[in-house]
Image: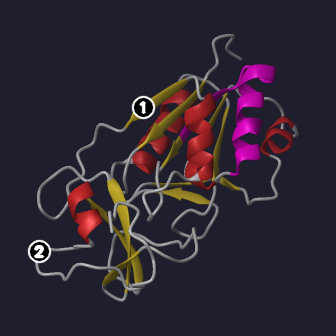
Amino acid sequence: MSASAELVFYYGPMGAGKSTLALQTHFNQRQQGRSGVLLTKDDRSNRPLVTSRIGLAAEAIAVDDHTDVHALITGRGIPDFLVCDEAQFLTIAQVDQLAGLVDDHAVSVFAYGLLTDFRSVLFPGSARLVEIADEIHRMQAVVLCWCGRDACLNARIVNGRMVHAGELIAIGDTGDGPVHYRPLCRRHFTQGRIDAGGEPGPVDTNSQNPFSTG
């Protein structure tokens, strides 16, 4: 265990390579002879895996809202490190439990996740990580909106139209499907424009665009 253990949060939009980096971090740490745990919550595969869009995958421990992460990890023996993918889906209590692993047991914790949801609002788990993490890093991989600008927000697409209302968690990917996601720049997120030929505006006209001045 390391006396300099920290809670580190890496964030970025969909497609920024968060899961890929999580898997690489887990691999690199293990290569140094360190014991570790790979954790996930609501992976896109709906299985106890960490999967990346470039085809990498590894078995992981999957948790739900009722999991006490501190008790789960310490009950297995104290590892040197923990890698947590999809950290945006953690509850506030679970993020505090990650911090407890760092402070009480010197476990190095690396968390990877989205910063904001499809409404451009901070996920509760991500907000708590921003509040208490020792280090916060924006992913450096370039993700582009359809217009060529940097994409910083994640739009939810339902039946071909962007929405601003609905359940907070709806598992999907950046590919085609009845429900999927698309990274957009702030301008086109505001307009509800998901491609060059798309019409602006959300499916639910009663839902409020968080950037709207109307």
Look at the picture and state if 150 lies above or below 147. above
Closer to us: mark 1 or mark 2?
2
Look at the magenta stretch and give its main secondary structure. helix
Look at the picture and state if 137 lies above or below 90. above
Closest to the observer: 169 or 207? 207
Callout 1, which amino acid?
Answer: His
Tell me the SS state at disc 1.
Answer: strand
Q: Residues within 10 Å of mark 2 (few under 14, many from 20)?
A: few
Q: Residue at x 24, y 69 (%)?
A: 191
Tags 1 and 2 in contact by the CB under 8 Å rule?
A: no
The residue that label 2 is drawn on is 196
Q: Position of residue 113 (x, y in %)?
A: 50, 48
Marking on residue 137? 1
Extent of the magenta region: 91-111
Q: Is residue 54 visible to us here? A: no
Look at the picture and state if 19 lies above or below 175. above
